[in-house]
Amino acid sequence: MTAPVPGRAAPRLNIGDAVHDGWQAFCRSPGAFVLFALLLWGLQVLFQLLQARIGTPNTGLSANPLDWLLALVGVVGSLASYFWGTIGMVRGALMGLDRGRPRFADLIRWDSGAIARLFWASLLLGALLLAALAAIMVVVGGPLGFLAALADARAGDLAPGLQLVILLLAVLLLLLVGFWLVGLIYLSVNQQFQAQISLREQLGPWATLRRSRALVDPHWPLLLLLVIVEGLLSLLGVLACFVGFFVAWPVVVCVSTAAYRQLLVLEAAQPPLPEANPTP
């Protein structure tokens, strides 16, 4: 891609190219990708079984300390395998996009630095979302719950002013939760390249979030469409007797990584901002 020409529309993400390039990257080593996806799925099933050892509130929680220890191992193992698998898939996708043929050994290679960067960036994003939701519930949901309990204790016999306050708080709570959900959707698209940035650019957690936002924001509507396309690909994989999911999963990662590579090219093609003239 080249820099935009004056009088023409600025270059933008091409979803068709991302899907094509991602599929080609997968096809350069489909066996390794599918085998790795099967391994990751098997590990997740195993760790879920370990977590189930503690029981459920309905069936009763286990009193055996060993069951709780195994459940903890299951939680840690599930998280570790997820981040390890994500980094491995992205590594293979990058190799495939460079016309290489990633081997199974390339996918399973442990990269503690990239895994840690992705973990901390994901943890930071989750903490920010939970903190925002908790603030809404404490500031608005708390008083609303107190007034609702008071109204219930008095069988609804409250002064008209308090009833109006309850109504206003309920409306405000719905609006704020709605805004939070909109923010969740925005960030789900905005932060979809955390794994690629963690592996390739090696930034800290906060810098990773800012970097993903800087890449995505100029093309956010197109990347929302790309997320929908990837969701449809995953759904088709599940519907294909579930076996197709082990193909769709790495294909989606390859497509997403191809889009990330496009954004890097587009970013590099942008002309530099003009320098301000020094004040005489």
Image (tube, helix red, strand yellow):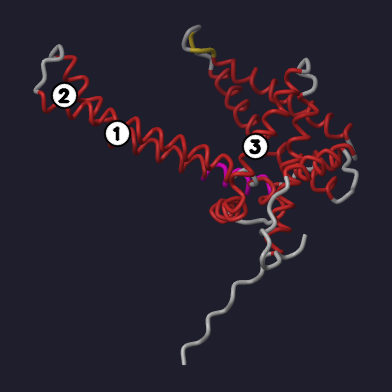
What amino acid type should be assigned to the residue bearing mark 3?
Answer: Val
Q: Secondary structure at mark 2?
A: helix
Label 1: which residue?
172
Image-quadrant location for residue 247:
top right
Residue 159 covered by magenta stretch: no
Farthest residue, direction bottom: 280
In-image side of 152 versus 132 (left or right): left
Q: Where does the magenta region start and end? A: 114-124
Residue 122 covered by magenta stretch: yes
What amino acid type should be assigned to the residue bearing mark 1?
Answer: Leu
In-image side of 139 versus 94 (left or right): left
Per the model, the C-alpha gap separating discs 1 and 3 is 30 Å
State the residue at coordinates (53%, 14%): 64
N-terminal of the pair, mark 1 or mark 3, is 1
N-terminal of the pair, mark 2 or mark 1, is 2
Residue 81, image x, y percentages: 69, 33
Type of secondary structure dominating the magenta stretch: helix
The crowd level at tag 2 (other Cα within 10 Å; few <14, some 14-19, many 20+) is some
Query: Toward the viewer: 85 or 68?
Result: 85
Q: Which mark is residue 227?
A: 3
Is 47 placed above or below 267 here? above
What amino acid type should be assigned to the residue bearing mark 2?
Answer: Gln
Q: Secondary structure at mark 3?
A: helix
Is 89 placed above or below 204 here? above
Query: Toward the viewer: 201 or 69?
Result: 201
Per the model, the C-alpha gap separating discs 2 and 3 is 43 Å
Farthest residue, direction left: 159
In what quadrant of the picture does the N terminus appear?
A: bottom right
In-image side of 33 versus 72 (left or right): right
In contact (CB < 8 Å): disc 2 and disc 1: no
Residue 277, image x, y percentages: 53, 85
In contact (CB < 8 Å): disc 1 and disc 3: no
